[in-house]
Every structure is written in C-alpha cells, then in structure tokens.
Amino acid sequence: MDKHLLICQIKTVSDLALLVSETTEMGERNTIVLHLKKDCFSAMEDTEFEQVKRILLDPYIISILIIDCEFSMSLYEKMYVFDLCFISEGGALRYDPKHENGLRFLHLLFSPKTSLGKEAGILNYEELMSYGFANALLRKESLREDLELEIQSLTMDRTGEQLYGIKSCMNAYKDCCLFGKTLITDPEPSCFCQLALLKTEEDKK
Amino acid sequence: MRYEFETIIYEESEGIAYLCINMPPANKMKSQFLIEISMVIKEYVLSTNASGIIIYGSGRHFSSGADVGELLEFISSHTTVEDGAVTHYPEWYLDCKESFMRLFHMKIPVVSAIGGFCIGSGFELALSSHIRICELGARLGLPESTFGLLPGVNGTLRLSEEAGFFHAYEMIVKGSLIDSREAKQMGMIDLLVQRKNSLDCARKLIAFINEHCSDYSFANRFHFLDGFKEYYFS
C-alpha cells in the first residue's frame, strides 16, 4: 500500500510544501492524506492554497483530511479540495454561527439538513461525529491501521478509470453547488458510457 | 385514468399521480423500463394536473436497480467512441437522465414511497423526487462501483445535494448499501415509517400539502414536511 499512499503530518503551513514537492518528485500516488495537527490550512495564503488545491483536486488522486486539532469555521471554506474527512480524538470545532460562508460549506460538504443552532461554542470529535461532520473516527492508538482499512475499502477492486470518473463528476458538481458555477458539460454521461464500454470489453475477455 | 405499460403503471386518482415500477418481485430495471420511464415522465407526468406525484414499487421492493448485464450490452451497442472520447451517446440513456432531472424540477410535490431494496438506478429515481418516505428495514445504495461502473442517472449530484459531498463520495466509491435508519441519519431520506406504510404516508403527505398551502416549492418542502410530521406523528 505504501507506494500508493502519501501521508503528510501538517503542523505548520510550510509542512504543506512537502506535499507539493513529494508529489512532484515521487510521481503519481493514488492517495494523499493530510494529517492536520494544527489548523494552519485555514490561514493559508491564496497562492499556496492554489498549489495544494491543484494537487488534491486531481481526479486520479483520492485526497483525505484527518482533523486532529482544534479548528475554526474557516477551514470548511477550504475543505472542499478533499474527497473525505476523518476525525481523530484531537479534533474540535470552534463553532461560530455567524461565520456564514463556513456554515454554508459545512452543510454542503457534510450534512445539508442538520441544524446546529445559534450558540457559539466548542464541538468535540464525538459531537462532530454525531452530527455527521466526518466520514469516520480514527482512534489515536490505531490511527494508521484504521486509515489503511478505510483506504482499502475505497480502492480495492476499483479501477483508476472509475475513481477518475467519480471524482471528475464530484469536482464539476462542487463547482456548481459550492461556487454557483453553471454546469456547461456534465462529465457523467461520458464517464458512465466509457466505463460501460471498458467493462463490456473486459467481460468478453 | 390508468395506463398500463410493460414495466410501469401510470395512474391518476383523487388528484394524485402514481408512477408504479411494475416488474415484481424485485423490480429490476430492464432496458425496456429505462425507455418507458422517460416516455411516461415526458408524456404524462410533466403535464399532469394532479396535486402531487408518488413513485413506488409494486410488491415488496422499490427497485433492485438495473439489470447490469443487459444494461452494459445496451450501452455498448449504442455508444460510439473516437480517439478516446465519446462521440455518440445512446439516446434512451440521455432521455432517461433528462427526464429524471425534469421530474426533479417539477413544481408540485414529487414523493418516493420506498420499501425493501432501493438500489442503483432505482435509488437514482428516488433521488429525483423531492421527498423520500422510507420504510423500516429498507436498504438503499449506489453499488455501481462494485461492478465497474459509476451512477449514471444524476445519482452523484443528487446524493451530494441530499447527504453532502463527503458522504456521497464515500457511499459511491465504496458502493455499500445502508439501511433506512442510517440513510435517514445521513439525510438521504426524509421520513421513516413502519413497514408497508410508505405509500399511505406519501398519499397523506400530498393531501396535507394540498390542504395547507398554495405555494409549495422544492425549496420550502421541509416546512410542509415538518408540519405534516407534527400533525400525524406527535
């Protein structure tokens, strides 16, 4: 699994530079995991964020965020560059109902129908899980094993073309739902029909 | 008014239009269904004067999804690819995708009454409705990725809108089925009812919306659903 997996532990913004250089130097990897030990993602400069975004939104890559620190609502505005978000025991949200854009992104990414109320406060990892604001909880003592199991259940028997197709659709729909862009070309028909053709060919072999 | 097709029954009764997936016991969607559903939506559903639409499955299951073998054959024989890009799509497929989207954009309540299996393109059809009423014990999911495909009839977009992008991605890539309680928790369904009660409940919901408002829209559907829950369940 290791040759397909890159895990970066992020404690400062400069740690993110590792992600950029690693992926460039070591070629294509299927899965990139950012283990956020400090909320430095929210405050990232636009130019740095653009670089990271370019890598994480690549349809050939599965990008995963593990939140393991206290974080602000602003993180949600950048979280869309990931495909999945896990939480560990250190994860806690400084909930601010007045942060309108963060709140909008939080709902669209995790749980459009959940109401969080009007009171500001800290939501710990258990509360975040109970609201559905993470895909799964990764326990500190078994974080690596839990993570690998999750990745395995995502990638086992899935072809690169499938993952590419699903993420291409997701990226296009995120642009529409999160940023109000018009969907000029829906990637779904092309990805769906191409996969059907590949599958038919494979079945004939 | 009642029209019976090979795979679908369309009926209007007491101001409600019913679209019944009629291929019991599993309601597996054959290519004939995918052709008929577009035709029924375009010719009957979109022009109905009914106050609401209910989609349901005949028998125990809503639908156990497409017949994959037949679907693959049907797609590959109607698709043209040149230099790695699709240059011609099967017309019935584009029709189906468009008619599901038009169903979703209707101005009257579109409600799915779900029991048993609601899988694959069956779930995509349910996701094309405004409100999903689901029976306890039902199982839902988009397992396309487990047999080399991806959801092809707006399922990725609609599931993301209902359950959020992260949960939709996980569910689509894993291709796992979940039970109705979990689906409710994740926002994929809107009302959980006892077994065999979804159709009756859908009927009552449309009557309730009809009685209490003249300004129904997809955007304010939960306003009416909350009122309905309070009236009937508390």
Image (cartoon, coloured by chain):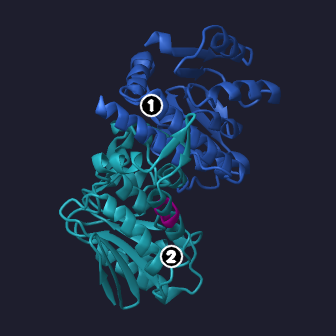
Chain colours: A blue, B cyan
Left or right: where does residue B184 sit relative to residue A171? left
C-beta proximity under 8 Å, tags 2 and 1: no
Look at label 1 and name its amino acid.
Answer: Leu
Residue located at (76% from left, 29% from top): A50
The span from disc 2 to disc 1 (Cα, nearest Å) is 35 Å
Q: Residue furthest left?
A: B25
Whether residue A59 is visible, yes or no, is yes
Left or right: where does residue A47 sit relative to residue B144? right
User: Where does label 2 land, which residue?
Assistant: B224
Q: Residue furthest top?
A: A25
Marks 2 and 1 share the same chain? no
Look at label 2 and name its amino acid.
Answer: Phe
Check the image and report above or below for B77 versus B51: above
Number of marks in picture: 2
In the rendered image, residue B149, in percent from the top left (x then y), is placed at 40, 40
Q: Secondary structure at mark 1?
A: strand
Residue located at (55% from left, 17% from top): A29
- Callout 2: few (<14), some (14-19), or many (20+) C-alpha neighbours within 10 Å? some
Question: The C terminus of chain B is located in which quarter?
Answer: bottom left
Whether residue A133 is visible, yes or no, is no
- Magenta: main secondary structure equals helix
Q: Which mark is residue B143?
A: none
Closer-to-camera residue (B157/A109): B157
Check the image and report above or below for A33 versus A164: above
In the rendered image, residue B10, in percent from the top left (x then y), is placed at 34, 79
User: Where does label 1 land, which residue?
Assistant: A137
Closer-to-camera residue (A188/B54): A188
Q: What span is colored magenta in the figure? A: B96-100
Question: The N terminus of chain B is located in which quarter?
Answer: bottom left
Instruction: Give the quadrant of residue B204.
Output: bottom left
In the rendered image, residue B174, in percent from the top left (x then y), is placed at 39, 36
